[in-house]
Image (spheres, rainbow, N blue to C red):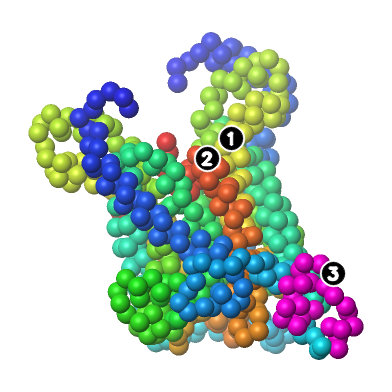
């Protein structure tokens, strides 16, 4: 951009545009910063009026997130002796003792299992289908591609009724396998469409050369196409993972005790008298920050997925 | 693609030899590769859809699986289409969809236009702006109820600070007049970046040379904006509207966590209403008919819109 161009915006224009965008960004990030900050507040600081910008950070929210606690009488406190760990000490300030771990860890683990499981399947099936659609003459190709896309137009609640009944019959309700299959199906439309775009861009000549060299179609696919499409596959995978990670409607309707993921769980974290905001914020922080980090690190590859591959370049 | 020497060799190779070389025929591989995807989509999308249609003609209740199921014809459909409460939820949904689209298009296009001024560091700010839309709507929506608290909430404090209104005098999610706007604000906060990204892709696809030519013809900046920028970005913008429109018509997670449909049923969008019928009142047959009506509506509106979009693209 060193050469002079008559269409290049002037310095003043750039400055004004930059300022406006920065102001918008700061305002729009405030709620997210507030979530992170609230996680480190004490319950009284969290609900202070007016809202506190400066506060003494504490890990109370995180301790409350991972434990269940019971109120203890002075005699009971006497009996158990002085607090053994730092998190014990935090709880004792409120005359409480730790009764055991909360379910947050389990829910988080469920999110990981279901997220990675469904992403793996959606990418595996998606890459195969995308390759076939990209390279072979498939009868009714356009119709099949549109059919795959149209499965995304259904409201989740509308599909949830029969899936609820079907899963009940098959014993898949509230199981990891059931959720993995469901999220795979939802993500497939995205992965087939995105991956087809990526594979279309790999020159066919590479495979043809490999075929001449005596590779079978399958070998050519595995040794020539897959390495070429690796970046595209990785960014599609991140997308599928984020969808499964964030999904709420199916999770809240189809899971309860065993396979529940974190999004339906976090809003149910209750303290004395309503929601325990520091604990909710702590849970939300641990859940949201990985996605934020991913987004910033992989921004170049993600932007294409956001637009569903419909917008190329 | 021009024929290369490879093509000649490929054509010259006798068919049986080619087949032996590649193991399975291409046709077989194509089907082996596509079949699992189609099978899974049939099992988890199409089969349930057919089942929904079948249930919609019955009075089945999922919480009483052993009760006799009667075929009731189109009674469920008639009842839904004549139910005033359902028309109210349709209106609430329309209000939500239209206003979020208007705000997101204006803000998203504006931001994209500003970012396209190519000031220093615009990549970094684009990434930061995108963050809200990558997060779980349910978790974020739940936290927004905290920001909307009359006294202790950040939103009320900021609005109070800027406008001088007492921050404890209004409740965004408790007030019948404000609640519809509370959900519109959060959705706009979350999804404006999406519209922005698509508009940005559109703006960047316009070749520099068109502006240069216009500049040579002494067209004013204002004229360039209306005769070049807007028409060239329009197909992209319409695509963004399509995606957002479909998503917001289906809206569930964000709003259910924010207001739960309340106060009363003022923000009860169709998906929330449907969930109530299906999974709280357990009127499965009735809810299935409701689901079919919603699906047909989305599909119908989307196809009409896509036709319009294609006409714009052809111009």
Residue B114 relative to residue B251: left or right: left
**Location of residue A159 (image quadrant):** bottom right
Query: Which of the pair A66/B248 is nearer the observer?
Result: A66
The reply to whether discs 1 and 2 touch (Cβ–Cβ < 8 Å) is yes
Cα–Cα gap, marks 1 and 2 = 8 Å
Asked if labels 2 and 3 share a chain, the reply is yes
Q: Residue at x 28, y 43 (%)?
A: A15
Q: Is residue B9 visible?
A: yes
Could you tell which of marks 3 and 1 lies nearer the N-terminus? 3
In the picture as drawn, the residue positioned furthest to the left comes out as B218
As for residue A84 lying within the magenta part, the answer is: yes
| Residue B307 lies in the magenta-colored region | no
Depth-wise, is mark 2 or mark 3 nearer the camera?
3
Of callouts 1 and 2, which one flags the residue occurring earlier in the amino acid sequence?
1
Q: Dot 2 corresponds to which residue?
A: A301
Going by the image, does A230 lie left or right of A34? right
Disc 2 is placed on an element classified as helix
Circle on res. A84: 3
In the image, residue A119 above or below residue B228: below
Q: In this rendered view, identify the residue nearer to me: A19 or B123.
A: A19
């Amino acid at each position: 951009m060193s050469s002079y161009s008559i269409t290049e915006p002037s310095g003043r224009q750039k400055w004004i545009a930059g300022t406006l965008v920065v102001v918008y960004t700061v305002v729009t990030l405030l709620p997210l910063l507030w979530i992170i900050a609230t996680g480190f507040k004490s319950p009284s600081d969290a609900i202070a009026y007016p809202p506190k910008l400066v506060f003494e950070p504490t890990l109370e929210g995180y301790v409350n997130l991972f434990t269940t606690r019971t109120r203890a009488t002075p005699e009971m406190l006497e009996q158990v002796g002085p607090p053994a760990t730092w998190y014990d000490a935090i709880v004792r300030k409120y005359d409480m003792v730790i009764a055991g771990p909360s379910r947050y860890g389990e829910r988080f683990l469920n999110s990981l299992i279901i997220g990675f499981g469904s992403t793996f399947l959606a990418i595996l099936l998606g890459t195969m289908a995308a390759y076939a659609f990209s390279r072979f003459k498939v009868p009714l190709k356009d119709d099949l591609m549109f059919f795959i896309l149209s499965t995304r137009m259904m409201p989740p609640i509308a599909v949830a009724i029969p899936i609820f009944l079907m899963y009940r019959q098959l014993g898949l309700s509230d199981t990891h396998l059931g959720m993995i299959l469901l999220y795979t199906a939802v993500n497939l439309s995205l992965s087939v469409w995105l991956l087809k775009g990526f594979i279309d861009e790999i020159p066919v000549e590479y495979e043809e050369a490999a075929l001449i060299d005596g590779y079978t179609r399958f070998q050519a696919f595995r040794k020539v196409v897959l390495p070429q499409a690796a970046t595209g596959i990785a960014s599609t995978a991140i997308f599928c993972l984020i969808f499964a990670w964030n999904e709420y409607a199916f999770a809240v309707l189809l899971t309860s005790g065993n396979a529940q993921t974190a999004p339906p769980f976090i809003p149910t974290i209750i303290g004395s008298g309503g929601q325990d905001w520091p604990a909710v914020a702590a849970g939300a922080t641990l859940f949201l920050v990985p996605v934020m980090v991913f987004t910033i690190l992989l921004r170049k590859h993600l932007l294409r997925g956001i637009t569903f591959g419909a917008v190329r370049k | 693609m021009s024929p290369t020497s490879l093509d000649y060799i490929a054509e010259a190779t006798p068919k049986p030899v080619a087949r032996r070389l590649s193991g399975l025929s291409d046709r077989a591989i194509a089907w082996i590769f596509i079949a699992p995807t189609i099978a899974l989509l049939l099992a988890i999308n199409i089969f349930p859809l057919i089942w929904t249609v079948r249930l919609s003609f019955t009075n089945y209740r999922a919480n009483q699986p052993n009760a006799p199921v009667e075929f009731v014809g189109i009674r469920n459909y008639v009842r839904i289409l004549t139910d005033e409460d359902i028309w109210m939820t349709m209106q609430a949904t329309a209000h939500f969809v239209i206003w979020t689209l208007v705000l997101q298009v204006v803000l998203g296009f504006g931001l994209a236009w500003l970012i396209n001024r190519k000031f220093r560091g615009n990549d970094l700010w684009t990434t930061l702006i995108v963050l809200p839309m990558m997060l779980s709507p349910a978790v974020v929506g739940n936290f927004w109820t905290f920001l909307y608290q009359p006294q202790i909430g950040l939103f009320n404090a900021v609005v109070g600070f800027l406008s001088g209104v007492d921050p404890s005098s209004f409740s965004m999610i408790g007030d019948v007049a404000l609640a519809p706007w509370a959900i519109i604000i959060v959705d706009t906060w979350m999804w404006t970046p999406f519209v922005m990204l698509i508009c940005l892709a559109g703006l960047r696809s316009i070749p520099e040379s068109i502006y240069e030519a216009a500049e040579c013809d002494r067209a004013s900046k204002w004229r360039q904006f209306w005769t070049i920028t807007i028409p060239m970005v329009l197909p992209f913008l319409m695509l963004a509207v399509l995606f957002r429109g479909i998503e917001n018509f289906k809206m569930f997670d964000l709003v259910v966590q924010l207001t739960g449909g309340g106060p009363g049923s003022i923000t009860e969008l169709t998906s929330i209403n449907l969930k109530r019928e299906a999974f709280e009142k357990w009127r499965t047959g009735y809810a299935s008919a409701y689901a079919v009506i919603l699906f047909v509506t989305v599909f119908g509106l989307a196809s009409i819109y896509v036709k319009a979009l294609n006409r714009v693209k052809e111009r």
